[in-house]
Structure formats: C-alpha cells, structure tokens
Image: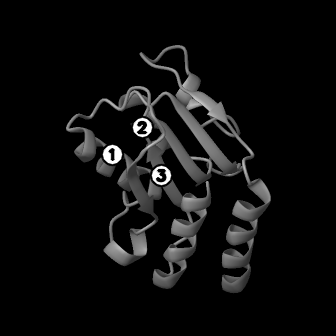
Amino acid sequence: MTLALRLAREALGSADVPVGAVVLGPGGEVLGRGRNRREADGDPTAHAEMLALREAARALGTWRLEGCTLVVTLEPCTMCAGAVVLARVARVVLGAWDPKAGATGSVRDVVRDSRLNHRVEVLGGVREAESAALLRDFFGERR
C-alpha cells in the first residue's frame, strides 16, 4: 500500500484524482503500477487499476493474472472491478471505500457476483485514513 499511496500522490501533479494501484504477483513481486491519468492522458479509461492491470499483463505475457493481488488506494469502480474479474485477479486490497461508486462491496459487489465466472477476495480498509485524507484534501481544494 505504501507504493500505491506514493503513486496516488503523483497523480496530484496532473490534476488527476489521487488514486494509485499496484499489481503484485503470486510471490509478492510488483508486476504493474498505475496512477489515475484521465486528465493527463485525456482517456476516460486511464484509471490507476486499469493501467496497473495492463502493465502486469505485459510483464507476465498473458491477460490471466491468476494468483495476483491488486492493491489500490480507493475501492474500484464498476469498470475496474469488471476488469479485475475478467483478468482473474485473486484478491483486491483497498484503502478507502467509495460510498458513491464503489463496486467491490460498498455500492455494488461486482467482484463477488455469483453469476460471474470468477470471484475475488476483498480486503478493505488498509491504511484507510491515509487514502481517504488524500481524496478529502484533493476534493476540498476544488470545492
């Protein structure tokens, strides 16, 4: 989570929402990193999770991220939760819950939907206060 928080802080330089994500391999090695880049890249899909998943897939040479863990500072949205399921990620470790758009247990629970072909373990609230503070400060400055 330390690396994910560092990546989230980097997003502040481009006016992007401060979210950072890391994909860890089955042995704990870092396979992918991402930070929100929607504003920086003008890309609506450039969420931290999506970028980290793409980098991990390239590192492994396959889209199947079986046994991998996604560590992210904010609960994934529906798009990102769907990508986690499709990539066969084993677990998501998240910092702050997202009571407006979260899709791994708060508003929706895409990653554990029994109708889908894969379910993901979720561990939430890891360094939650730090993750939430980054977001609170970011949005506080813009309102």
Residue denoted by label 2: 25
Specify the farthest residue to the right: 129
How far is the residue under mark 2 from the one under mark 3?
10 Å
Mark with earlier residue (2, 1): 2
Q: Residue at x 49, y 84 (%)?
A: 13
Between marks 2 and 1 in the image, the one whose residue lies nearer the viewer:
2
Q: Relative to residue 35, is residue 100 depicted above or below?
A: above
Residue 37 is labelled as: none
How far is the residue under mark 2 from the one under mark 1?
8 Å
| Residue 131 screen position, x and y as percent | 70, 61
Quadrant of the rendered structure where residue 83 is? top left
Q: Relative to residue 74, is residue 27 depicted above or below?
A: above
Specify the farthest residue to the left: 61
Residue denoted by label 3: 22
For the residue carrying disc 1, how many other residues have a C-alpha within 10 Å: few (<14), some (14-19), or many (20+)? many
- Nearer to us in this view, 119 or 28: 28
At label 3, the amino acid type is Val
